[in-house]
Image: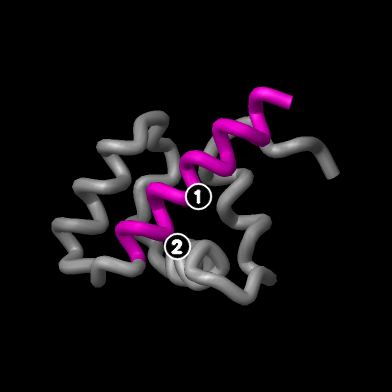
Amino acid sequence: MTEPRTFWQWLKRQDDRNDFIGDLARDAVQDDTFPRRAKHYDAIKWYLIGRNACRPAQIALARAFREWRRYRAV
């Protein structure tokens, strides 16, 4: 399997985690309208807000984006 290059590719691989990021990943995989091609945090954040996502989901997104950026920096 190739290394994930986009946030979406990285996020969908987090679905086995037992934390908020895993919850976000599982929800995103099941959501056909999730902005999978989005390149910017704000685009996904506003999508979640528009879907009335709970605060833990919004926090999970922020943490996931930070982790993904660290992952890409390695």
Q: How much space separates mark 2 and mark 1, taking CA atoms?
A: 12 Å
Classify mark 1: helix, strand or loop: helix
Q: Nearer the viewer, residue 24 or 30?
A: 24
Name the residue rendered at 50%, 40% in the picture: 66
Q: Nearer the viewer, residue 45 or 63?
A: 63
Query: Closer to the camera: disc 2 or disc 1?
Result: 1
Q: Is residue 55 left or right of residue 10?
A: left
Name the residue rendered at 35%, 37% in the picture: 41
Q: Is residue 37 above or below residue 57?
A: above
Residues drawn in magenta: 57-74
- Where does residue 17 sit, x and y in percent of width and height? 65, 69
Which circle's residue, 2 or 1, is located before the other in the chain? 2
Residue linked to disc 1: 64
Q: Main secondary structure of the magenta part?
A: helix
- Where does residue 29 sit, x and y in percent of width and height? 51, 64
Which color scheme is applied?
A: one colour
Residue linked to disc 2: 28
The reply to whether dot 2 and dot 1 touch (C-beta < 8 Å) is no
> Is residue 3 shown in magenta?
no
- Where does residue 18 sit, x and y in percent of width and height? 62, 76
Q: Nearer the viewer, residue 6 or 61?
A: 61
Q: Is residue 59 above or below residue 4?
A: below
